[in-house]
Structure formats: structure tokens, C-alpha cells
Image (cartoon, rainbow, N blue to C red):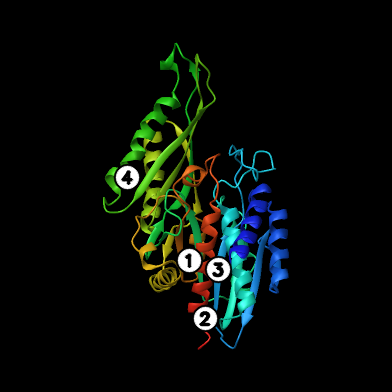
Amino acid sequence: MADKIDDVADWRRALHQMPEPGFEEIKTSRFVATKLRDFGLEVHDGIGGTGVIGVLRQGTGNRCIALRADMDALKITERTGLPHASRHDGVMHACGHDGHTAMLLGAARELAQRKDFSGSIVFLFQPAEEHGKGAQAMIDDGLLERFPFDEIYGLHNLPGTPVGRFATRAGPLMACEDNFEIRLTGKGGHAARPHTSNDPIVIAAHLVLALQAIVSRRADPLDNAVVSVTEILTDGIRNVLPERVTLRGDTRSYLPAVQAMIEREMRKIAGGIADAFGAEVDVDYSHEFSSTVNHAAETDHALAAAQAALGAQSIEPEPMPMMGSEDFGLFLKHRPGNFAFLGNGTEGAHGLPLHNARYDFNDAALGPGIAFWTTLARQRLPLTD
């Protein structure tokens, strides 16, 4: 078993050296497809652009589950100094997708060799998770019709948590992410003669503060919501009042009703403040990530598999939900499933936050990840079916 984990660690480090951003995972997809073919799986590549599907069938069972890993990297310059550091300038696996891909490949190999299940497994290697576009691209490319799985499962490493620790919960686990851009148009002029202008910076300042009332005075205190203005852009200079100001930002929530309320109230507030100051306003509001809301039965299945594979002492069945986002949430809108976290360790690069230039996936987590995947597959597709 140790030799097999060493192989998977080698794969992980090879993937780490060739990181590719969303929809550019050419080498990564080729690596994945080659391994799956070597294991004897039926392979389909180019799904949703650069996605890869491996299908493994065994026995007479007619049920099908999907196991998903993400493949893309981030446009961050790596600063780990490790021997297996990125060889692609300005791109690195700062979120552990190299580890996710490697552990699912390890699970595919073991299940293909042992053939101790009955049914079908779809190994789903997704592109462009970081942009929140890959899941939709695969769905648009006929994923659900071409590979009609009954349930789907995802797994993500969690820095700062001991290796082998498994955490998930039914219901909301990660938030949706929406982005907005509000463009205000007033009347520019000389900074020394503000009375001859209609300064959109003053209007924008009122708007920034007013938007916070969406959370404090429109959202139920028991519901989670975040509204953040992250950029203020103008066409003015030091002694010139601008004509235009653009506000950009990000919102987070779990529930569709809260998501809709935030957009509705933002448009209303922006329109009202612009009208009060005699300015023009345009609001663009986009839905980037769906919230990740786990299904109850599939969460029970994931917890049962984790307990069998990792031990009851390693299970955290009610972790606090996170306001970060994950593209896996879109799959859960189409099929029942579960998304879970697996500890990446607490020391050194393994305990650093995700998206950090010095972060590294912990190869010690590969064994627990493979054990979870293979146990889940055997439990969900038992030979007794």
C-alpha cells in the first residue's frame, strides 16, 4: 500500500509542477486521461472544454455515482521554494487541486484493480472551478445526459485541520458568490468649484454606506449575508472632480431568497440615492457561484464512509458553514450529493490558508482521501445489489 501511495504522491508533485488556470488545463487533462486509460477505464475528454470523465463499470448493479475532483490552478506566483514547485511562471496550485486530482486517480486505480463493487462510477475531473464556470460548461456539454449518475460527491482539503480529519454537514456548507458593478454618472468639474459640478464621489460615498443596511436592516439576523464594496474607480485626478465613479464588489449568502433580496435591495438603493442627487446609475449584478447545499441522505452516506475508512474519532458531523464559495454547488442543484472537507495538516506550508503563495498540499492526506473515496464507492455500490 505504501508503494501505491508513493506513486500517487509522485503524480501529485508532477501535477503541481505543471499548473494551468481554468479552461487551459491541457497538460493536466492529458495526464489524467492517460492514467485513466492505463487503469482500463472508459475515457471521455474535452467535456466542457478541458474536463475529463472516466467511467468504471462492474457487476450487474444499475446504480451510478459520480466522484468529482477539480483540476485548475490559480494565477499566483509560487513562493514555496520546494523541489516540486511550479514550472509555469505566475501560476501555481495554491488551492490543492493537484492533490484532489491525484487522490481521485488513486481511487480510480484501486477500484479498477479490485473490482469489489457492483454498478458504475463516473470519475469527474472538472476544469475551471476557481472561476465558477467549469461545472456549468460540463453541464452545457451534456454531462448529465451522457453520464446519468444518481448522486455526486466532492472533497476539498482543509488547511489548519489535522490530516485525516473529515468534516461535512447537511444543508448549507458554503455560500453562493455574486458580483456587482455600479456605475454612477454625475457632472465633473474643478475641485475648487464643487458647486458647479455634481460630484459622483460624494454620491458613491453615500451609496457605500447605504449598501451595508442591506445586511443590517433587510436581512433576517438569523440568515447569513455579506455585502462588500471592494473597488472604487473614477476618471478624476487630484484637482478634478470626476464625471464617473464605478463601485465593484462581492456578495455572499446561502439561501436563494436572501440572494434575491440582496440584488433587489441593491438595485433599489442605488436607484434611490442616484435619483436623490440627480445622477444617473447603472447596476450590473451577476451570479458567479451557486451555494453548496448538501443533501441529507447523501451526507449520511459520506459520513458513514468516512467513519468506516478513517475512524469515528476523525469525523466532524456539524462543522460551521463557510462564506467561501465552491463550484460544486451547481452539481447539487441537479443531483443529490455531498461536499466534504479533509484535513491538510496544521504545520508549515500545509497549514497556510488556501490561495497563499507558500501553501502546499500535504501528501500525507492522499491516503485518507483515497480510503474515503474507495470506501464510499463500495458502500454505495455494494456487491450484494
Q: Secondary structure at mark 1?
A: helix
- How far apart are the alpha carbons under marks 1 and 3? 13 Å
Circle 2 residue: 381
Residue in front for this viewpoint, 193 or 352: 352
Q: Are marks 4 and 2 in contact (CB under 8 Å)?
A: no
Q: What residue is rendered at 50% in x and 23% in y?
A: 242
Q: Secondary structure at mark 4?
A: helix
Q: Are marks 1 and 4 in contact (CB under 8 Å)?
A: no
Label 2 crowd bin: few (<14), some (14–19), many (20+), radius 10 Å: many
Hey, what amino acid is under mark 1?
Leu
Hey, what amino acid is under mark 4?
Val
Hey, what amino acid is under mark 3?
Leu
| Quadrant in the picture for residue 30 | bottom right
Q: Earlier in the sequence, mark 2 or mark 3?
A: 3
Circle 3 residue: 67
Q: Secondary structure at mark 2?
A: loop
Q: Position of residue 178 (x, y in %)?
A: 47, 49
Residue in front for this viewpoint, 38 or 311: 311
Q: Earlier in the sequence, mark 1 or mark 3?
A: 3
Q: Mark number for residue 215?
A: 4
Q: Are marks 2 and 1 in contact (CB under 8 Å)?
A: no
- How far apart are the alpha carbons under marks 2 and 3? 13 Å
- How far apart are the alpha carbons under marks 4 and 2? 45 Å
Residue in front for this viewpoint, 148 or 233: 148
Q: Position of residue 240 (x, y in %)?
A: 51, 16
Front: mark 4 or 2: 2
Label 3 crowd bin: few (<14), some (14–19), many (20+), radius 10 Å: many
Q: Earlier in the sequence, mark 2 or mark 1?
A: 1
Front: mark 4 or 3: 3
